[in-house]
Image (cartoon, helix red, strand yellow):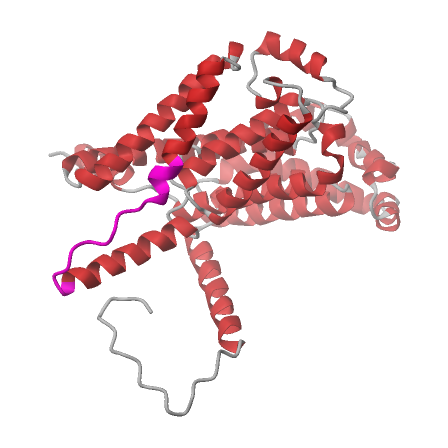
């Protein structure tokens, strides 16, 4: 076999044998779900005026728009206040569970449903970050983003340790997972109700997609339970390919956002003379800290550095992906830029969404170190909490089997 063939075989083996970027996909999952969750909780007192029956963009106007663009939203199935609040509660709950990584495959689909339902109901309520959340909610469905830093990963590790301990004493395997099938059946009942009632209307194509995802999940469970050999290996290869291809699309999407924004800024005179930054700093709506905004706006040097620095970083970033050191420097600069936008312009959720999307480019070594530091901090806090005192004549603890967790 020639050298090119060998390299191609190694590349194919790499993209099919494992889901690449497990830490990056986990950070993306946590960041996007946390951004949407915090946004929903902050707007909880105003939810009816933003997306509900009291919204200026009335239900009839939204229905007229959706009849033309065929966007998916559960809120067009009924104009009932109870139905709206149920969908809002679904969005909040799915965001929290996706953040924790509990039954991530199902929660990623429900998270996408919640995002699309609310955003497509009132299309004028976004600040730019809503577009990022919308896209990433769709992409997360196709990723294996719960391999680390999730309740699913912890449950899988505990189950593997328990099975290893039982095999050591020649016992039967542990009891199968029962929550997953129950959740699968419940979601199937919801899909049946949506299909029979026929509320989907012109959005029936997306309901059909949900049916496909539901069937795939059932087949996956059957393969994991009864066919652990080659059929399961083939399913893993397909899942890894879908994950890796989606991660490439996410990276390309982030690069496209920055490159298009940067090149668009170059063509306009407002970014050449600094007024694109000066004017927002003078608007009360974008000045949560008026004193700080006024100080920055009155300094021509600071305005020039921030203006040209923003354009340079956005244009240059896609070209630095093949140089790890330069890429990491620009990545830190972009995250600091978004942190500044959150602080100076009062757009925290836009900044959180963009920082979460930028996180797919963070080096794995840094993420592993960050996770280890967080784990040590958590363990130290648990150790500082005093436990219940044992009586003086308490018996010695029983021996633990090797590999078992206490």
Q: Nearer the viewer, residue 149 or 189?
A: 189
Image quarter (top left, top right, bottom left or bottom right) of the C terminus: bottom left
Q: In the visual, does 92 lie left or right of 164? A: right
Query: Which residue corresponds to the image point at 37% horizontal and 91% vertical from the top-left?
Result: 393
Number of numbered labels in the structure image: 0
**For the point 66% across and 19% down, which residue is it?**
79
Q: Is residue 379 left or right of residue 354?
A: left
- The image quadrant of residue 87 is top right
Residue 360 image position (x, y, % from top left)? 48, 42
User: What residue is shown at x 32% (from left), y 26% (from top)?
Assistant: 215
Quarter of the figure with the N terminus: top left
Of residues 162 and 381, the one nearer the viewer is: 162
Closer to us: 261 or 305: 261
The stretch in magenta equals 168-183
Most common SS among magenta residues: loop
For residue 406, above or below residue 310: below
For the view shown, which residue lies furthest in the bottom direction?
Answer: 392
């Amino acid at each position: 076999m020639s050298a090119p063939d060998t390299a191609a075989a190694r590349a194919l083996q790499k993209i099919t044998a494992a889901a690449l970027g497990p830490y990056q996909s986990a950070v993306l999952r946590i960041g996007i779900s946390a951004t949407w969750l915090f946004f929903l909780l902050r707007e909880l007192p105003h939810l009816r005026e933003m997306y509900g029956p009291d919204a200026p963009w009335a239900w009839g106007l939204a229905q007229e728009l959706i009849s033309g663009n065929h966007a998916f939203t559960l809120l067009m199935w009924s104009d009932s206040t109870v139905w709206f609040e149920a969908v809002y509660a679904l969005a909040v709950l799915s965001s929290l569970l996706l953040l924790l990584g509990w039954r991530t495959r199902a929660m990623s689909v429900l998270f996408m449903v919640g995002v699309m339902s609310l955003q497509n109901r009132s299309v004028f309520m976004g600040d730019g970050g809503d577009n990022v959340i919308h896209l990433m909610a769709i992409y997360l469905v196709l990723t294996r983003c719960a391999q680390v830093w999730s309740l699913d990963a912890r449950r899988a590790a505990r189950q593997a340790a328990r099975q290893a301990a039982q095999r050591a004493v020649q016992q039967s395997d542990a009891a199968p997972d029962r929550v997953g099938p129950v959740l699968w059946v419940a979601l199937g009942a919801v899909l049946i109700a949506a299909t029979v009632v026929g509320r989907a209307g012109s959005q029936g194509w997306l309901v059909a997609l949900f049916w496909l995802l539901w069937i795939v999940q059932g087949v996956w469970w059957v393969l994991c339970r009864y066919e652990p050999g080659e059929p399961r290996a083939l399913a893993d290869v397909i899942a890894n390919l879908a994950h890796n291809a989606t991660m490439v699309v996410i990276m390309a999407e982030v690069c496209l956002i920055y490159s298009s924004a940067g090149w668009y800024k170059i063509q306009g005179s407002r970014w050449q003379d600094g007024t694109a930054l000066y004017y927002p700093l003078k608007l009360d709506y974008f000045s949560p800290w008026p004193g700080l905004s006024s100080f920055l706006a009155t300094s021509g040097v600071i305005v020039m550095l921030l203006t040209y620095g923003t354009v340079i970083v956005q244009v240059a970033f896609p070209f630095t992906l093949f140089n790890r050191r330069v890429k990491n420097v620009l990545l830190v600069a972009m995250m600091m830029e978004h942190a500044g936008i959150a602080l100076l312009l009062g757009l925290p959720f836009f900044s959180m969404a963009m920082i979460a999307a930028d996180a797919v480019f963070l080096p794995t070594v840094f993420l592993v170190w960050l996770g280890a530091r967080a784990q040590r901090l958590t363990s130290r806090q648990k150790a500082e909490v005093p436990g219940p005192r044992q009586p003086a004549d308490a018996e010695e603890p029983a021996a633990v089997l090797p590999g078992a967790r206490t």
